[in-house]
Structure formats: structure tokens, C-alpha cells
Image (spheres, rainbow, N blue to C red):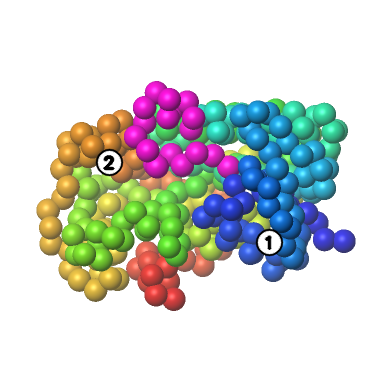
Amino acid sequence: MKKNVLLTGGTGFIGKKLTQLLLVSGYSVSILSRSNKANTDGISYFQWDVDAGTIDEEAILNADYVIHLAGENIGAKRWTTARKQAILDSREKSTQLLYTTLQKTNKKLDAFISASGVGIYGAITDEVICTEATPAASNFLVTVCQKWEGATASIHDLGIRTVQIRTGLVLGKGDGVLKQLLPLFRLRLGSAIGSGKQYMPWIHIDDLCRIYLQAIVNQEMQGPYNAAINDGTNNTIFSKTLAKVIGYKMGLPNVPAFVLQLVLGEMSQLVLQGRRVASDKIEKTGFQFQFTDLEKALHNCLFD
């Protein structure tokens, strides 16, 4: 009988791609959704409502693994007080609901794997290469990641192997960071942002999904793992490479930091700051990245 993987956020950018990989890898997939959806071949849908604190317990009872991707998009809207709370609640409350259901049903999963972000290392630009042991900094994005990961501690306390995937900027076809950047760059209006020196630890979506699969298969994996390429890509390098792949040489001046601060407010830290992260820990599990060259990764996302 096939092992079952229960996904939250399974209909999103990463979730859709991960579902495909899990199915071809011999797993059955269940997806928790806010709306009622009909089952398809290999995929079962179950309803939950995080705000109401309700969940179809069958989803948990049928699962061998849970991959928790759900959470409000951090970069979708300006960070008002209400928006910040929604971002936090979508991660903490959803994890808490999964925990209480696991506890109530006394379900022993093979593993609980949660998304997290390299933002836990802070909105800082320096030359430190952050490992999973690097102390967290102090800002809103750090708080989000800390509480996100902290909420999984209760699941670990149930005796369930727990993994956190600290994700960088995800490159993929038609969505993610490229969906936001491509309209300007295709008009040849793209440019570097702020100083251009802020690091942009990136990962191709295929590699990210393979890391989640690795976390299922490798029973030794536990705790946090960085999921990003450590190649020193900063915003200037990324912008110039994207322009090159599209077919032109970038010549416009950098967008001044103060413009983005006026438009985005506190959320501007997402694009104006960035640190390097190490990938040694995930590679020591035997994982090998398929995409380590930025130009080739971008070409794959745009043309392959």
C-alpha cells in the first residue's frame, strides 16, 4: 500500500509541483483545502478552516507524513498591523490545529515537515554565511520564521520526527519571484534595487521539491535545513543575469532604496537586504542540487 503524504498549501506554487513529484515517486497525496474539492486520481482532498479551528480528522488519520506549506504570502500586501497578524496567525494557528488533531487522535506520523524561510537570519546585508546554527536577528520577518518553527516544537514533543525547510527565493515557471520581476524585465525596464549588494539566496523549485522528498525518505533528517544555493548571488548579479537570459544588457540605474521604502514601508526589507546561507547541512544528507548555475536555472524557468 502506498504511503500517504498530507499537504497543507498543496494548491499553491510549491504545493502543485511537490504533488507531482510525490505522485511519480510512488506516494498517494492528500491535500487540506478551505474549499470542498472533488478527489482526482491519486489525490484526496479534505477540508479545514484554520480560523474556525476545524479539520477533517480523516486527513490526519490517513497520513503517514505531513508537509506543512500553508501560510499567507509574506510579500503580497503592505505590512499593516492587521496584515502582520494575519501572516503570523496563518502559520502559528495552522500548526497548532495540526498539533491538537495529532494529539487528539493519537496519530503517530513518520515525519512532520514544515516550511520556513532563510529570513530567520534577519534583514541584514553582510559577509556572514549563515548556517542553521547562526543566531536569529531581530525584525518582523525573523519573528515570523521563529514562531513558525517554534510552533512545530509541540509536534516534536509528541515523538514525531520534525524537519524545517528554510527556503530561499524560489525560481520556477510562471510564479514566485520571477512572476513579479518578469513584466518589467521583459520591457527592458528591470534594474538592480537599492545598493544591489544585498544577497539573494535562490533555489530552483525542482530542487526545493526534491529536498522535501529527501526529508521524507531520509529518516536521519531532523531540525532545520537551509534550502538555497550558496553562490554569492546578490541583487545586481541576479538582475544582470535575468536581463542577459531575456536577451539584453541591463543599463538603467538602480532603483533608490528610499523609493521602495516609501512604496512598501517596512516590507521593503524583503528586497533591500539579504544574507548568504550555507547549504552544507542538506548536502551532507546526500542531497545534490540539480541547478547550481543561476543563468541555467533562469533559462530553464523561462524557456525549457
**Dot 1 amino acid type:** Leu
Q: Is label 1 in a helix, a strand or a loop?
A: helix
Residue 227 at x, y percent in the picture: 51, 51
Label 2: which residue? 272
Residue 57 relative to residue 49: left or right: right
Query: Are dots 2 and 1 in contact, CB under 8 Å?
Result: no
Marks 2 and 1 sit apart, C-alpha to C-alpha, by: 35 Å
User: Which image quadrant: the N terminus?
Assistant: bottom right
- Residue bounds of the magenta highlight: 70-87
Q: Nearer the viewer, residue 286 or 80?
A: 80
Identified at 18% across, 59% down, the residue is 189
Query: Would you call the spot at circle 2 few (<14 residues within 10 Å), some (14-19), or many (20 or more)?
Result: many
Identified at 39% across, 75% down, the residue is 303
Query: Would you call the spot at circle 1 few (<14 residues within 10 Å), some (14-19), or many (20 or more)?
Result: some
Q: Is residue 9 visible?
A: yes
Q: Nearer the viewer, residue 133 or 38?
A: 38
Residue 4 at x, y percent in the picture: 78, 54
Where is 178 relative to 260, above or below? below
**Dot 2 amino acid type:** Leu
Residue 222 relative to residue 263: left or right: right
Label 1: which residue? 22
Residue 216 at x, y percent in the picture: 70, 53
Question: Which is the main secondary structure of the residues drawn in magenta?
Answer: loop
Q: Nearer the viewer, residue 188 or 157?
A: 188
Q: Which mark's residue is nearer the viewer, 2 or 1?
A: 1
